[in-house]
Amino acid sequence: MKPVTAIIFKDILIEMRSKESVSSMLMFGVLVLTIFSFAFEPSSVDRSLIAPGILWVAFSFAAILGLNRSLAMEIDNDCLQGLLLAPLDRGSLYLGKVASNFTFMMMAELIVLPIFVIFNNLKFNLQFLEIAGIAVLGTLAIAAIGSILSTISANTRMKEVMLPVLQIPLTVPVVIASVEATSMVLSGETKGISSWLYLLAGFSIVYLTVSYLVFEFVVEE
Amino acid sequence: MPDTFALESEDIRKTFGHFTALAGVTLTVRRGEFVALFGRNGAGKTTFLKIAATLVRHTSGKLRVEGIDIREEPEKARRHIGFLSHNTYLYRDLSPVENLRFFSRLYGIPDSEERIMALLDRVGLRRRAADPVRAFSRGLHQRLGIARVMLHDPSVIMLDEPYTGLDANAVEILNQILDQAAAAGRTIILTSHDLEQGLRAATRAVVIDRGKIVFEGSPKGASIRDAYAAYIRVGVGR
């Protein structure tokens, strides 16, 4: 676990200096919530129908900004090569990047989520905690696949464009499951929510396992 | 394999699609040797060094570092390797101490603080230990890069064009560190365009052209200069 924690601490230290990753995700997330709040009149539609979609659009697109920043940090001065020289299996490096990306995404989401609650006239009760739990599962899956895709796109010419082009289609099942689970929590009809949560957990495990195994081939020239 | 070899490559080949970067490089480097690799741009010297440092996977052939097959046990081999290229692999938002602390954690170096300070002393960066690397000149960057390479006390030091962009002072410091490492019995493999700098402390000179070794011999005398003239100076126009 030492290399994983070393990468997390290093990324946190860099983030504390540059303040680029969390702040850009946060700004983007808040802007998406604000724009959609203006776009839909509060009384015109059932908020529980559209609110989960708005929340997960904000989360998943903001995650791409954070992943791009994480990628830029490792490309600058070829730092990724420095990591690859360390006497560790490549999978540990991948897990380290997943952990730090997940941490930054959660930090931004922890601020975006209360704003979402306020904009949608929800209450800070058990419902809020349930949505936070769904956010943890969904974000883990997004960080798991996003961390390897950002490494793949690092070797392409149009890095910033390539990441969303690869990331969005692969996170569609995660976003659908997260939206459905969030929608059930907001409507109060949580019967059957477990199947969506299992799906989220399943995607997280599959993405983590496959990416851990193939990371070595992704980083090789 | 005799235990006197720090590096042994057998018919190393590397292709990128249809392009052949290495067309069968066989080279043995004894422990404590200082080998200078010369070649024009694209000759394959950086590719060879990156393969030896486990950064690039070779297409075929066998390569051992300190007797360890780099394909079978890459993590074990990396413990013996220190690699420096023109990019220093340092995080610009961190200070020298923070960078070295991070790498010492990755390498699992116990009680690293003393070693970090000693290395910063050696490269003349102790007074700048807390400054962000972003503010460093190319020369200071490279000095810190050298400290990163020496951090885990590697037995095989590989340097890819280490003199590029360095001022006279930085060249002097780099040479001092390389001389100390050579005196301590470390194996050094260095690529360079600069014949004089490359040969300064080398015990053997190798010229690579079009992915193959075309000259291997003493760094003293006329033969290396002839080979350099034939394959590099003339080769530029080819």
Image (spheres, rainbow, N blue to C red):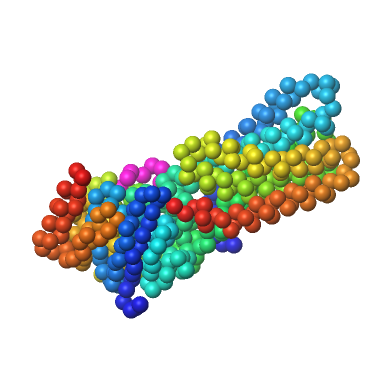
> In which quadrant of the rendered image does the C terminus of chain B lie?
top left
Quarter occupied by residue B151: bottom left
B90 up-or-down from B184: above or below: above
Between A39 and B237, the one lying in front of the other is B237
Residue B111 percent location from the top left of the image: 48, 66
Q: Residue at x 55, y 44 (%)?
A: A150
**Which residue reaches farthest bottom?**
B2
Res. B130 in view? no
Residue B134 colored in magenta in the image? yes
Between B96 and A29, the one lying in front of the other is A29
A49 up-or-down from B69: above or below: above
Res. A68 in view? yes
Q: What are the residue bounds of the magenta stretch?
A: B131-139
Tag count in the figure?
Answer: 0
> In which quadrant of the rendered image does the N terminus of chain B lie?
bottom left
B186 up-or-down from A168: above or below: below
Residue A69 percent location from the top left of the image: 54, 40
Q: Residue at x 36, y 60 (%)?
A: B13
Residue B28 colored in magenta in the image? no
Residue B78 percent location from the top left of the image: 43, 65
Residue B5 percent location from the top left of the image: 32, 73
Q: Is residue B119 left or right of residue B73?
A: left
